Amino acid sequence: MRAKAIIAGTLLLAACARGEPPTTQLAVAQAAIDAAVSAGATERAPETLTMARDKLSEANQAAATGKYADARRWAEEAEIDAKLASAETRTSFAKADLRSAEQSNTLLKHEIERGSPTGAKGGDRE
């Protein structure tokens, strides 16, 4: 009887040591990846997005085998990479917007210079 109690206690401790599956962290990481894809990371930050997806896959595999601490760590890294992919995507769009604005400014400057008798140097128009 005592041996059964010791075995049961050992099994209970082992089960507690494994902890709970990181379902929330897995969901958060997946949501971050989905947000990155929606933002355009597939085209603008594909390498970073792939890293996030690979790490989430590792997290899911670890969770499926009961390695919850590893799963949580992989899921957290996947979330961070997905957020980085989103940031890289926003940066890429901002740079494209900046280039477009610079081109528009250059065109406008040329138009002003063509319309002015003295060019952009100033001077009298009298």
Image (spheres, grey):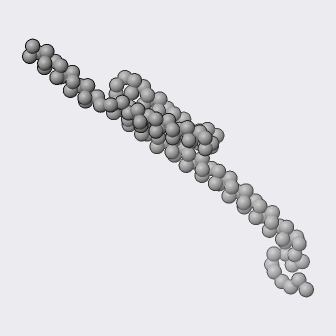
Report which quarter residue 100 is drawn in: bottom right
Where is residue 115 shown, x and y percent of the image?
A: 89, 72
Q: Nearer the viewer, residue 60 or 51?
A: 60
Q: Residue at x 76, y 64 (%)?
A: 105
- Looking at the rendered image, the quarter that the C terminus falls into is bottom right
Where is residue 2 shown, x and y percent of the image?
A: 8, 16
Q: Is residue 85 left or right of residue 6?
A: right
Where is residue 118 shown, x and y percent of the image?
A: 87, 78
Q: Is residue 36 left or right of residue 10?
A: right
Q: Nearer the viewer, residue 70 or 33?
A: 33
11 versus 85 height, above or below: above
Residue 69 shows up from this direction: yes
Q: Is residue 10 left or right of residue 42?
A: left
Residue 74 shows up from this direction: no
122 versus 1 height, above or below: below
Q: Residue at x 41, y 36 (%)?
A: 24
Q: Is residue 110 left or right of residue 48?
A: right
Report which quarter residue 36 is drawn in: top right
Q: Nearer the viewer, residue 44 or 68?
A: 68
Number of numbered markers? 0
